[in-house]
């Protein structure tokens, strides 16, 4: 009876994920690679910005930049004060109860990304065409194969090993640009080490135990691995695209007439976007105001998809990681885990004299 219930849960969960992700994604990014044509993107990569920080201190925009920086600083101070409050502590405990779904969210996102990539004859992103990769037809087949293995939770560790081999293989074609997709690398590593037993066939067939039982004591590393490599991907993309090759963002700004919204020069907006993306990446790596930072990144991602009418599937992984980090925020390797308790203690000390009176 118990085996039958597990099988029903596994099949039901996989079917639900299929409905959610395989039929919602054909809709509609701002990764510049998703917005510009391949020719524009390649041309932009050959143009290097001489002084990408200069637009931020341009007298024409300096006041705007300083007011924006002040607003961001105040928002983070308020977030930390809220995080140290009793209601925030209660809410945190409620949200953390969903942590069992974290790996399921990740699994669903990566499987859907692989399947849609295969349908688009690409890998990880639409700009990484498999037509440029030797034996790309084999990689395309493996993307379908691994995608469905991960979706239904069948031999997850083996699927992750194949995915890791594919990632390394295409790196020989696309080089250091693959750092843009370090978030995928993090997810693959986590699945390879720890699998995913929740709502999976592996749970029904293999039970709860990991393939390598000694790894059980390291399961707390799941969130740090995902978080740090996601931050690395954002940091790398922010620096290389919006700073080192700032012309790419300028081209997007001009082509989509964004001056009508921002009323500022293209160079200033490109530099500002670069700073924002790098700070978000850095804060995620450090685990600084994690939930607030992830919410900000989700707002940017969603607005980008809606405005530029980008493909949704390249962003599924970003959504999956973001929701997972919202649930599993504040692991032991984050600044939040050190700062928030100290603020709570400080606030309690200040309240003691008042309560004594």
Image (cartoon, rainbow, N blue to C red):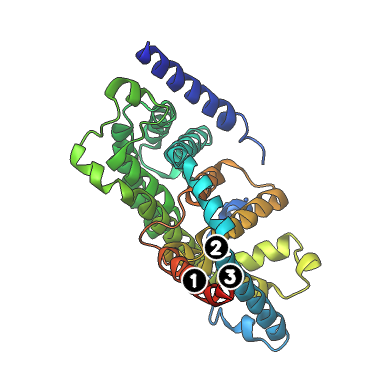
User: In the image shown, does 179 or 131 lie closer to the viewer?
Assistant: 179
Q: Where is residue 260 in the image (x, y as percent from the top left)?
A: 81, 66
Q: Earlier in the sequence, mark 3 or mark 1?
A: 3
Distance Cα–Cα, label 2 vs label 3:
10 Å
| 2 and 1 marks in contact (CB < 8 Å) | yes
Residue 257, position as x, y percentages in the image? 77, 63
Instruction: Name the residue tied to disc 3.
Output: 76
Badge 1 density bin: few <14, some 14–19, many ≥20, Cα 10 Å = some
**Residue 224 in sight here:** yes
C-alpha distance separating marks 2 and 1? 9 Å
Residue position marked by numbered label 1 in the rendering? 343
Mark sitting earlier along the chain (2/1): 2
Q: Name the residue under label 2.
A: 83
For residue 177, above or below residue 274: above
Quarter of the figure with residue 227:
bottom left
**Mark 3 neighbour class, 10 Å CA radius: few under 14, some 14 to 19, many 20 or more:** some
> Crowding at label 2, few (<14), some or many (≥20) Cα neighbours within 10 Å?
many
Q: Which of 92 and 137 is in front in this view?
A: 92
Q: In this view, does 190 lie to the left or right of 357?
A: left
Report if the CB atoms under discs 2 and 3 are less than 8 Å apart: no
Residue situated in front as seen by the camera: 53 or 98? 98
The reply to whether the C-beta atoms of the residues labelled 3 and 1 are less than 8 Å apart is no
| Quadrant housing the C terminus | bottom right
Q: Please indicate whether residue 47 sits to the left or right of residue 6 in the image.
A: right
For numbered disc 2, what is the local secondary structure? helix
When the figure is inspected, residue 129 is found, relative to residue 155, above or below; the finding is: below
The kind of secondary structure element at disc 3 is helix
């Amino acid at each position: 009876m118990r085996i039958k219930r597990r099988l029903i849960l596994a099949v039901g969960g996989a079917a639900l994920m299929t409905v959610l992700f395989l039929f919602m994604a054909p809709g509609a990014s701002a990764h510049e690679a998703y917005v510009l044509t391949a020719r524009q993107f390649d041309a932009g990569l050959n143009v290097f910005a001489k002084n990408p920080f200069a637009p931020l201190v341009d007298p024409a925009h300096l006041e705007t930049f300083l007011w924006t920086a002040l607003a961001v600083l105040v928002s983070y101070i308020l977030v930390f004060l809220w995080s140290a409050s009793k209601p925030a502590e209660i809410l945190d405990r409620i949200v953390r109860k969903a942590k069992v779904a974290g790996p399921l969210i990740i699994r669903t996102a990566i499987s859907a990304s692989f399947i849609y990539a295969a349908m688009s004859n690409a890998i990880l992103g639409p700009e990484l065409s498999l037509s440029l990769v030797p034996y790309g037809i084999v990689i395309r087949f493996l993307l379908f194969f691994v995608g469905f293995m991960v979706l239904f939770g069948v031999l997850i560790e083996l699927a992750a090993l194949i995915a890791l081999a594919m990632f390394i293989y295409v790196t020989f074609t696309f080089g250091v640009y693959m750092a843009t997709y370090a978030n995928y690398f993090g997810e693959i590593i986590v699945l390879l080490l720890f699998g995913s037993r929740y709502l999976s066939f592996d749970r029904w067939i293999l039970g709860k135990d990991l393939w390598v039982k000694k790894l059980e004591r390291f399961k707390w590393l799941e969130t740090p691995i995902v978080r740090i490599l996601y931050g690395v991907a954002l940091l790398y993309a922010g620096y290389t695209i919006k700073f080192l090759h700032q012309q790419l963002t300028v081209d997007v700004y001009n082509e989509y007439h964004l001056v009508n919204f921002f009323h500022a020069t293209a160079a200033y907006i490109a530099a500002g976007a670069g700073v924002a993306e790098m700070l978000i990446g850095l804060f995620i790596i450090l685990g600084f105001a994690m939930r607030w930072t992830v919410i900000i990144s989700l707002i940017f991602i969603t607005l980008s998809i809606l405005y530029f009418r980008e493909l949704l599937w390249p962003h599924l992984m970003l959504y999956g990681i973001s929701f997972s980090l919202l649930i599993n925020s504040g692991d032991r390797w984050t600044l939040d885990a050190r700062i928030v308790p100290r603020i709570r203690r400080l606030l309690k000390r200040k309240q003691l004299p008042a309560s004594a009176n």
